[in-house]
Structure formats: structure tokens, C-alpha cells
Amino acid sequence: MRLISFRLTLLALAIGAVSACFKRSTIPADASSSLDSLALTRGACYGTCDVYEFVVRRAGTATLRRKSVESRLSVTPDAARHLLASALAAGVLTLPSRIQSDSALCPLEASDHSTIVLTAYGAAGVNRIEHYTGCYISHDLRVAPRLERLVIFEHRVDSIATVH
């Protein structure tokens, strides 16, 4: 029962984060054209967290892999392009490759959190970001402002992955 309550709480937070992302960002329709695909891999933590790999391609295909089981997700090409554009707006091409190494983005670390690896593939090459989710800006557990959109994007992918 606690697990169901926890997942419902996470889903509510993800929905709020997604709506906040849409309200605050204006993404040009062709913004996703610089990305061909994006892979988001969520690693293990010391608690109960989903471990998965989610891949979305501009052509409109997406896959979700959990414990060596791969599922194809139905994603329209428009939805895939919007997801890639949201990833760009979140900073997948501009944030440092290892967020934990940047003291401005990770001045305080909480232990027992998972690491998310985002790999963006595009015409300009491959960009990889390793985001330890235990990075906080202060003792009140706020995320660094430059990471806020990335965290919102990660929650959006979590909401997609946990539904399937």
C-alpha cells in the first residue's frame, strides 16, 4: 500500500513538473531537429526507485528497457520531436558532462540517490551528461536553478516510464 501511495505521489509531482515545464518554456517547432535521439538511463539507488533505459527517436519511435525486457512505446513523431525539444530546453547540450563535479551545480550531496545518464545523439555528435540526483543547492533540498529544467524533464520521462 505504501508503494502505491508513493508512486501516486511521484506521478502527481511529475504531472505538476510537466505542466510547469510547458508553462515556462516556449520551444520552437524545429528545435528538436538538432537531435536525432535521446537515451535516458536511470540507475539504481539504495531505496525503491525505478531502474530503466528510455530511448526516444525523432522519427517517432521509443523504447523502454527494464531488467533486459524491452518494450516499444507508441509515440507520435510530433510527441517525439517535442520531447527532444524539451530535452534541448533542459540543457542536454549545454550542461557539463558530470554535474556532480561542478560545485555551482552540486555544492551539497545527499547520499543514496540514483544517477541519471542522458545521452543526446545529433548531427553535431554525441553529448553525455551524468546527473547524480543527490545534488542540491542548499540544506532546504532545492535543486540548483540551472538544473531545474533538467530535473523537470527527467520527471517527465519518469512519468512516461512508470505508466508502461
Image (spheres, rainbow, N blue to C red):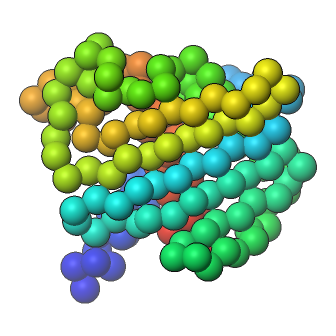
Residue at left offset 28%, top offset 69%: 48
Q: Quadrant of the C terminus?
A: bottom right
Give percent across and percent down for residue 52.
51, 64
Q: Residue furthest bottom?
A: 1
Q: Is residue 57 above or below residue 122?
A: below
Q: Residue furthest left?
A: 139
Judge from the rendering whether residue 113 lies leftward or rightward of residue 156; answer left or right: left
Q: Is residue 76 above or below residue 117?
A: below
Judge from the rendering whether residue 119 lies leftward or rightward of residue 37; answer left or right: left
Give percent across and percent down for residue 63.
71, 64
Give percent across and percent down for residue 134.
25, 40
**Most foreground residue, 126 or 114:** 126
Judge from the rendering whether residue 86 lies leftward or rightward of residue 77; answer left or right: left
Residue at left offset 62%, top offset 58%: 54
Judge from the rendering whether residue 141 lies leftward or rightward of residue 33; answer left or right: left
Q: Quadrant of residue 94?
A: top right
The answer to whether residue 82 is seen in the rendering is: no
